[in-house]
Image: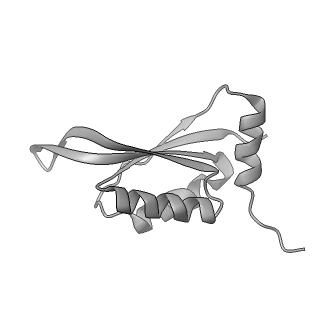
Amino acid sequence: MLQALLILTNLPDLTSARALAQQLVERKLAACVNLLPAVQSTYRWQGVVEHAAEVTLLIKTVDSRYEELESAIKAAHPYALPEIIALPIVAGLPAYLDWITAETQKDVNV
């Protein structure tokens, strides 16, 4: 049985966030991507405390697609060290979890 995952990443602007979300869903690496604009991040980077406005992406996928999804995020991401965090979805509406699984299956040429 596939494990549903929620992947978190942040991008610097809405344009790059929308482009990444589109790419992930088109490639069936994600069933759905929610964009949360106007996130305010505070973090230490190279010894300096930084503040930035970012767009958080909530990406729904399954564990069998994680490696390819991670590679796609890294390839398209403008940050030198992108945040990519995977959280297991331990419970949810069964029909929704089934939908995530169905929407992230690789196309099979018959």
Identity of the residue furthest to the left in this view:
48
Q: How is the image coloured?
A: one colour
Residue drawn at (64%, 27%), measured in percent from left and top? Answer: 90
Residue 4's image quarter?
top right
Identify the image quadrant of the N terminus.
top right
13 or 43: nearer the viewer: 13
> Would residue 102 appear left or right of 33 to someone viewing this image?
right
Q: Eyeballing the image, is 47 above or below 14? A: above
27 or 68: nearer the viewer: 27
Residue drawn at (62%, 65%), measured in percent from left and top? Answer: 27
Residue 5's image quarter?
top right
The x, y position of residue 38, in whole percent, is 29, 42
Q: Eyeballing the image, is 21 above or below 86? A: below
The x, y position of residue 52, in whole percent, is 19, 46
87 or 34: nearer the viewer: 34
Counting the numbered discs, the total is: 0
